[in-house]
């Protein structure tokens, strides 16, 4: 009789197996929701406008003007010109490409530091823009 009680317990496991089937039904619904979310994100990306603060022409200091020129430029263009200067003179550290080795002109921009990280570089450049 003890074995008879164990046999009905086996069918109780079948409903537990039915739960993953319910999860499988929910998974395609989530997959269907993702393309709709992608479509919503794609529409505003086409209408995106540049931030006016980045596009505002700023005058570089005389120290920075030696690298990028004296004409007023937006911040984005100043950064591009500094990177062009760094790449032209191969001033990135070969062992750690995130570090910039300063020559005489950049050392003045970097506040006398011989080497700065690329993230610190943008902060130091912004101090030279008015």
Image: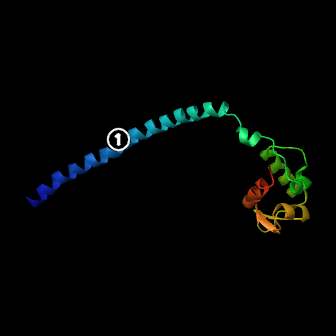
Quadrant into which the N terminus falls: bottom left
* Relative to 49, 69 lies left or right: right
The mark tally for this picture is 1
Taking depth in this image into account, of 16 and 8 the one nearest to the observer is 16
Looking at this view, name the residue that lies furthest to the front: 130
Name the residue rendered at 72%, 38% in the picture: 52
Q: Is residue 81 left or right of residue 45?
A: right
In the rendered image, the vertical position of residue 107 relative to residue 31, given as above or below: below
Residue at 58% from the left image edge and 35% from the top image edge: 41
On the image, which quarter does residue 107 sit in? bottom right
Q: Which colour scheme is used?
A: rainbow
Horizontal side of residue 122 vs 6, given as left or right? right
Residue 47 in the image: state x and y as whole percent: 66, 30
Dot 1 crowding, Cα within 10 Å, few <14, some 14–19, many 20+: few
- What is the secondary structure assignment of the residue under circle 1? helix
Residue at image location 90% in from the left, 65% down from the top:
104
Residue 108: x percent and y percent?
A: 86, 63
Name the spot of residue 91 as percent of width and height, x first.
Answer: 86, 62
Q: Is residue 92 left or right of residue 48?
A: right
Residue under circle 1?
22
Q: In which quarter of the image is residue 71?
A: top right
Query: Depth check: 29 or 67 in front?
Result: 67
Which of the 4 quarters of the picture holds residue 57? top right
Q: Is residue 26 above or below residue 9?
A: above
Which of 114/128 is in front?
128
In the image, 82 versus 96, the foreground residue is 82
What residue is rendered at 48% in x and 38% in y?
31
Q: Percent x, y for residue 78? A: 82, 48
């Amino acid at each position: 009789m003890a074995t008879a009680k164990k046999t009905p317990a086996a069918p109780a496991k079948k409903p537990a197996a039915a739960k993953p089937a319910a999860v499988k039904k929910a998974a395609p619904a989530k997959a269907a929701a993702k393309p709709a979310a992608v479509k919503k994100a794609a529409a505003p990306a086409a209408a995106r406008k540049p931030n006016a603060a980045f596009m505002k022409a700023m005058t570089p200091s005389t120290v920075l003007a030696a690298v990028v020129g004296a004409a007023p430029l937006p911040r984005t263009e100043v950064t591009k010109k500094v990177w062009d200067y760094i790449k032209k003179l191969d001033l990135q550290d070969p062992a750690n490409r995130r570090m910039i080795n300063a020559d005489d002109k950049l050392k003045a921009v970097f506040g006398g530091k011989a080497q700065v990280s690329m993230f610190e570089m943008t902060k130091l450049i912004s101090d030279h823009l008015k």
